[in-house]
Image (spheres, rainbow, N blue to C red):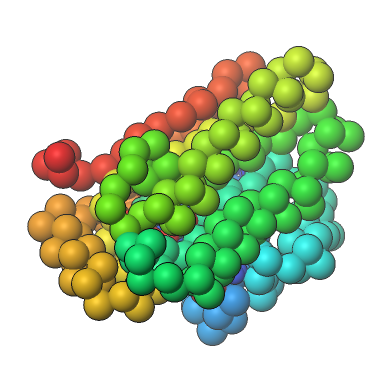
Amino acid sequence: MIQDKVVIITGASSGIGEASAKELAAKGAKVVLGARREDKLKQIADDIKAAGGEAVYQVLDVTKVEDSEAIVKLAKDTFGGLDAILLNAGIMPVSNVSALKTGEWKEMVDVNINGVLNGVAAVMPTFTEQKSGHILAISSVAGIKAYPGTAVYGGTKWFVRDFMECLRMESATEGTNIRTATLYPAAINTELLNTITDEGAAAGMAGLYDAFGISPDRIAKVVSFALDMPEDTTVNEFTVGPANQP
Ligand code: NDP
């Protein structure tokens, strides 16, 4: 049941994170929004409250350990507990390896990998102690299959896949009852393409998304489905994308 669950959402200021926050809040979850753009977070929290939901927000840079710990504290102080985290924050400055955009490689590793690790590290003590908790992560179809231009981005998303599956198995054997769910979206119309600086890659992606992109609401519905499962059931992996995207 989603009703009254306390859920942290990273990268909640736009796209899939915003859509998930609104979907879960509409179903009765108490959502805790984190991202770097405070004005966007405030607007989304206001929208949720105006619709009768419960939301708080805090500026969060997922690359900073202390920010991840602070948002867990905010959730527990505000709502008296923590049930789930959606590890959604991510960037996608794709380019061919030969472009040698080494700064962007490091940024992707920091946000898409270290950001996930910081979030998990921040919630694990609570989830382990209470012997329940749900960790949901947004990987990508680029974390399953290689595409030209996604060598580093896809690598970070492949990491998420491997990490989440290891976590699932360890939690099962340790008896901590921590559930995991990993989502692999394809082309979803969000602000994600804004992080691309390579002109060729940007043009290619724009063409793909113009042709196939669908609303982030669709991913939010899958997040909601996974979160709604009974405590004895884990929805482990979902690939979700446009029906007409090859
Ligand atoms: P958006 O760009 O709309 O959302 C990305 C979110 O991540 C924003 O809220 C952004 O907020 C946040 N973010 C970025 N860097 C940081 C940081 N250092 N700390 C905290 N928050 C950060 O794109 P999407 O909604 O599409 O992306 C969400 C996730 O979905 C990403 O992990 C992406 O890789 C994944 N994905 C998206 C697909 C798509 O087609 N759109 C396909 C497959 C996967 P702010 O800038 O305010 O910090």
Could you tell me which residue is drawn at 63 percent across and 17 percent down? 232
Instruction: Please state the horizontal and vertical placement of residue 181, each as a whole percent of the image.
Output: 54, 34
Instruction: Please state the horizontal and vertical placement of residue 10, each as a whole percent of the image.
Output: 59, 60
In the depicted view, which residue is nearer to us: 75 or 59?
Answer: 59
In the depicted view, which residue is nearer to us: 135 or 193?
Answer: 193
Res. 211 image quadrant: bottom left
Instruction: Please state the horizontal and vertical placement of residue 120, each as a whole percent of the image.
Output: 72, 47
Q: Residue furthest right?
A: 129
> In this rendering, is residue 208 above or below 85?
below
State the quadrant of the N terminus. Answer: top right
In the depicted view, which residue is nearer to us: 87 or 126?
Answer: 87
Please indicate whether residue 153 sits to the left or right of residue 81 in the image.
Answer: left
Q: Residue furthest front?
A: 98
> In this rendering, is residue 125 above or below 50?
above
Please indicate whether residue 6 sits to the left or right of residue 123 in the image.
Answer: left
Q: Residue furthest bottom?
A: 39
Please indicate whether residue 223 sits to the left or right of residue 162 in the image.
Answer: left
Could you tell me which residue is drawn at 36 percent across and 71 percent down? 99
In the depicted view, which residue is nearer to us: 147 or 212?
Answer: 147
State the quadrant of the C terminus. Answer: top left
Could you tell me which residue is drawn at 81 percent across and 19 percent down? 174
Residue 180 visible from this viewpoint = yes
Instruction: Please state the horizontal and vertical placement of residue 76, each as a whole percent of the image.
Output: 81, 54
> In this rendering, is residue 130 above or below 214?
above
Please indicate whether residue 16 sits to the left or right of residue 55 in the image.
Answer: left
